[in-house]
Image (cartoon, grey):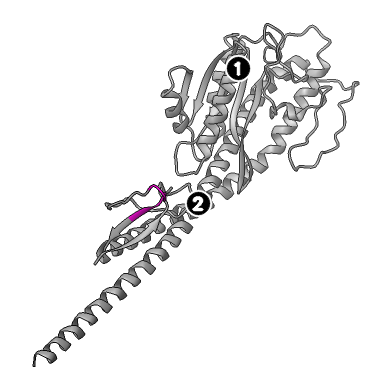
Amino acid sequence: MAFSIWVSPKPSFLQNPNPLVPQISRQTRHSQSSRTQSIQCGLRELRERIDSIKSTQKITEAMKLVAAARVRRAQDAVINGRPFSETLVEVLYDINEQLQGEDIDIPLTNVRAVKRVTIVVISSDRGLCGGFNNALTKKAQTRIGELKKLGLEVVLISVGKKGNSYFMRRPEIKVDRLMEGGTFPTAKEAQVIADDVFSLFVSEEVDKVELVYTKFVSLVKSEPVIQTLLPLSPRGEVVDVNGNCVDAIGDEMFRLTSKEGKLTLERGSVKKKERKEMSLLMEFEQDPVQILDAMMPLYLNSQILRALQESAASELAARMNAMSNATDNADELKKTFSRSYNRARQAKITGELLEIVAGAEALREAE
């Protein structure tokens, strides 16, 4: 005995909050006045669907718990690493600002007319994390378009399998290097990227380096951002050969600076901290140039490591939320199919009883 149930078309399994529908063989009936589909199925098919949904729900629940266990560790790494990273930038800005009036050549702080830009895009190695990678690649694509409109050449360094596969399918985007990420980033992984970026900038193959990654805000919120990595300019403005500013709107690095190039520590909901200006009478035991030369590699490594950690925490939080939504959707769909199964079973039993009663009545009349 067959019956009809109604579901909305084009269901999404893991990302869409609408009830998910497993792929099964079915007969559909389209109507011009309705955008729904009619599914004809019997009791056996319903039982198979319910069992399939239960199995899927167990998988998504397990993935949710794994992501929840890992995201705590990743969140702690982000929170614990932010003070060091911000303080290091603060010290570098102060030293660099005091050296502005001196004739000293520091390669990583040289601001030159921009002709070529390298963008480091940090994505994830795995999927099943909602719109995490989609939002990131869209941000990177938009930024590439903005730079190309200014007549600049753009070269990418892609970190993460999902970003690699996305940019490999687009031959119009020049990719310098493809790298794989990890669940828990380390300083060694960050150093590999930092060495590549350092060689490109010092050799003047590129004039500006930017990071595109997903900033971790909370377990339920993350946002893709752009951060200028090089050059380290206290003024927060890098221009091309025509004098046009090429800095991204809302640049994460220059959010740390005020209009006069002075550093503040205001970040989102974090309260602004009062900090003491570096004394002009301060004496360095070593030459400031030597200090900067020693700290700049540390700066590169810390900023890239921080971006990797933020991206990893955002990915795990997105996966936890996606699996939570999938589990809830599976539970709702299981209830819907269970009600339909019970109705069909009751209808079948009622029909059989009516046939028995009708047969008995016919025999009695025949006698």
From where the camera sits, is residue 312 visible?
Answer: yes
Q: Are marks 2 and 1 in contact (CB under 8 Å)?
A: no
The amino acid sitting under disc 1 is: Leu
Label 1 sits on a secondary structure element that is: helix
| Depicted 28 relative to depicted 81: above or below | below
Name the spot of residue 23 as percent of width and height, x first: 32, 50
Q: Which quadrant of the rendered structure holds the C terminus?
A: bottom left
Q: Residue at x 67, y 10 (%)?
A: 240
Marks 2 and 1, Cα distance to the nearest angstrom?
Answer: 36 Å
Mark 2 or 1: in front is 2
Q: Which residues lie in the magenta part?
A: 32-38
The amino acid sitting under disc 2 is: Pro
Give the class, few, some or many, for how many residues have Cα within 10 Å of label 1's Cα (few <14, many ≥20).
some
| Depicted 233 relative to depicted 66: above or below | above
Residue occupied by mark 1: 147
In this view of the protein, which residue sits in the foreground, 217 or 91?
A: 217
Label 2 sits on a secondary structure element that is: loop
Q: Residue at x 73, y 26 (%)?
A: 254
In this view of the protein, which residue sits in the foreground, 84 or 254?
A: 254
| Numbered label attached to residue 17 | 2
| Numbered label attached to residue 312 | none
